[in-house]
Image (spheres, grey):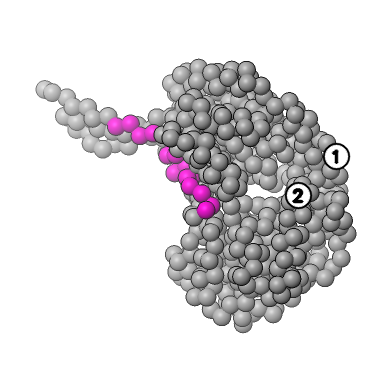
């Protein structure tokens, strides 16, 4: 039995039976059957069907409240995920022809040589809870546009998201069984990944989860897109717009209670402006209102579950015991033993000997460290097993480009953080994973190249 505990009050929100072996078998077979027709459906018709599916989904008025209840994000911030879903989906719909067009190698009276991009087959999407709609749309929409069928397994924290997506697919003109979902435990998930009817896996989650995906694939020759951990850094240079940097880095650190794949977890500040930055960061953070996310005045909700809350508090406490100092002095009501409401914190006097500055925290906390110059900043930014995003805050574009070329990361921002442009490749380096979603490049990972070498003999 799948049970979803809402972090708002730790009560049971959703109960579902896990999919049975018979249901799993039927789903896999139906996906294969549907693929044979869907792959040969003209792209224009696939585009229209996927757009219809997206529009049905966006018309569901219950999504925002249920999103808040499942993950604890303040209800005033939940509509932003719907906007992100729409922006990404429509970008991919509008640009899929450009991404999927055949590539012409040679065309004359004798040769007609070109490369077509063929769909892979059945894509198994394993989506996380922290941005359950934005992460799943990155995989589902381009997979369908490319001519694949999709089976979605959503987190046990957000099962309603899978059901709401399926409901929209059922109401739309998408052909039956082109998009399906399953509620699965870990054992069944691994079994499906290993099944020969799965042609590609897209997983967003932990590094350990990514390793399990690779292990389940085993010796099969299929690909996997893995978006895993992050410990995203920011460098605040002395020539930045300080007020802008503070406001945006506070938001980048605490939005969604710090439970963002590309949330800010480390900030390196030039010593010339360090004290002003720390004072401003403290002041801005202490304006937050931690509370029930269903209330309109709340802008910081609980973290997803009690275990996560415990781990976050423990990592912060370990750093403080090693000499770090929490600059946030405002009192936020929180019962460490019984609820998921974790007070925001910002630690100074930190260094890279602390787990807090090296391991992913995924909570409403951030480390702020003084640096002498950009060389030291780059060295520290790269001193990590992860590399999803990194940012610089400066008024000098050329300096930003130079530092960006030295930082080991998938996306490099200047004067911005914690955002996805659907026209840019979403990717990472090191333990952050492999593969690409979004942009026209994302379609290349959902198709295989097939070359045609056609010669005319006169």
Query: In the rendered image, which quarter contains the C terminus?
Result: top left
The residue lying toward the viewer, choosing from 93 and 267, is 267
Residue at 84% x, 68% y is 330
Image coordinates of residue 53 in percent, x first then y, are 61, 28
**Residues at badges 2 and 1 in contact (C-beta under 8 Å)?**
no
The location of residue 319, given as percent across then percent down, is 70, 68
Mark 2 and mark 1 lie on one chain; the one further toward the N terminus is: 1
Q: Is residue 115 left or right of residue 63?
A: left
| Residue at left offset 78%, top offset 30% | 15
Front residue of 136/52: it is: 136
Where is residue 334 drawn, in percent x and y? Answer: 86, 57
Residue 19 shown in magenta: no
User: For the view shown, which residue lies furthest in the bottom direction?
Assistant: 272
Local packing at callout 1 (Cα closer than 10 Å; few below 14, some 14-19, many 20+) is: few
Circle 2 crowding by C-alpha within 10 Å: few under 14, some 14–19, many from 20: few
Magenta-drawn stretch contains 443: yes
Q: Which mark is drawn over residue 11?
A: 1
């Amino acid at each position: 039995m799948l049970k979803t505990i809402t972090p708002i009050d730790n009560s049971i929100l959703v109960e579902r039976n896990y999919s049975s072996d018979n249901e799993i078998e039927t789903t896999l077979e139906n996906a294969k059957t549907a693929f044979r027709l869907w792959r040969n459906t003209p792209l224009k018709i696939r585009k229209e069907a996927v757009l219809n599916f997206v529009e049905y989904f966006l018309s569901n008025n219950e999504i925002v409240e249920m999103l808040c209840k499942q993950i604890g994000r303040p209800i005033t911030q939940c509509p932003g995920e719907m906007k992100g879903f729409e922006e990404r989906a429509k970008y991919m719909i509008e640009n899929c022809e450009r991404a999927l067009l055949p590539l012409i190698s040679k065309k004359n009276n004798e040769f007609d040589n070109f490369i077509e991009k063929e769909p892979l087959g059945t894509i198994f999407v394993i989506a996380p809870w922290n941005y359950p709609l934005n992460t799943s749309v990155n995989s589902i929409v381009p997979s369908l546009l490319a001519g694949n069928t999709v089976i979605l397994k959503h987190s046990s924290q957000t099962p309603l998201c899978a059901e709401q997506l399926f409901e929209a697919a059922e109401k739309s003109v998408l052909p039956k069984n082109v998009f399906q979902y399953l509620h699965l435990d870990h054992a069944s998930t691994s079994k499906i990944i290993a099944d020969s009817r799965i042609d590609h896996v897209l997983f967003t989650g932990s590094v350990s989860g990514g390793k399990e995906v690779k292990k389940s694939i085993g010796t099969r020759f299929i690909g996997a897109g893995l978006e895993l951990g992050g410990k995203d850094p920011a460098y605040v240079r002395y020539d930045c717009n300080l007020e802008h940097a503070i406001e945006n880095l506070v938001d980048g650190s605490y939005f969604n209670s710090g439970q963002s794949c590309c949330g800010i977890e480390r900030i390196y500040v030039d010593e010339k402006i360090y004290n002003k930055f720390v004072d401003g960061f403290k002041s801005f953070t202490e304006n937050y209102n931690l509370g029930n996310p269903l209330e309109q005045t709340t802008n910081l909700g609980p973290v997803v579950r009690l275990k996560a809350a415990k781990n976050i508090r423990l990592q912060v406490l370990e750093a403080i015991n090693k000499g770090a100092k929490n600059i946030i002095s405002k009192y936020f009501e929180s019962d460490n033993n019984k609820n998921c409401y974790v007070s925001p914190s910002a630690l100074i006097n930190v260094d890279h000997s602390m787990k807090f500055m090296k391991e992913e925290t995924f909570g409403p906390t951030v480390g702020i460290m003084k640096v002498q110059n950009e060389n030291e900043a780059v060295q520290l930014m790269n001193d990590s097993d992860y590399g999803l995003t990194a940012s610089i805050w400066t008024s000098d574009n050329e300096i930003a480009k130079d530092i960006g070329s030295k930082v080991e990361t998938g996306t490099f921002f200047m004067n911005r953080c914690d955002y996805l442009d659907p026209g840019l490749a979403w990717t990472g380096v090191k333990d952050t994973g492999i593969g690409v979603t979004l942009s026209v490049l994302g379609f290349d990972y959902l198709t295989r190249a097939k070359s045609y070498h056609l010669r005319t003999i006169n």
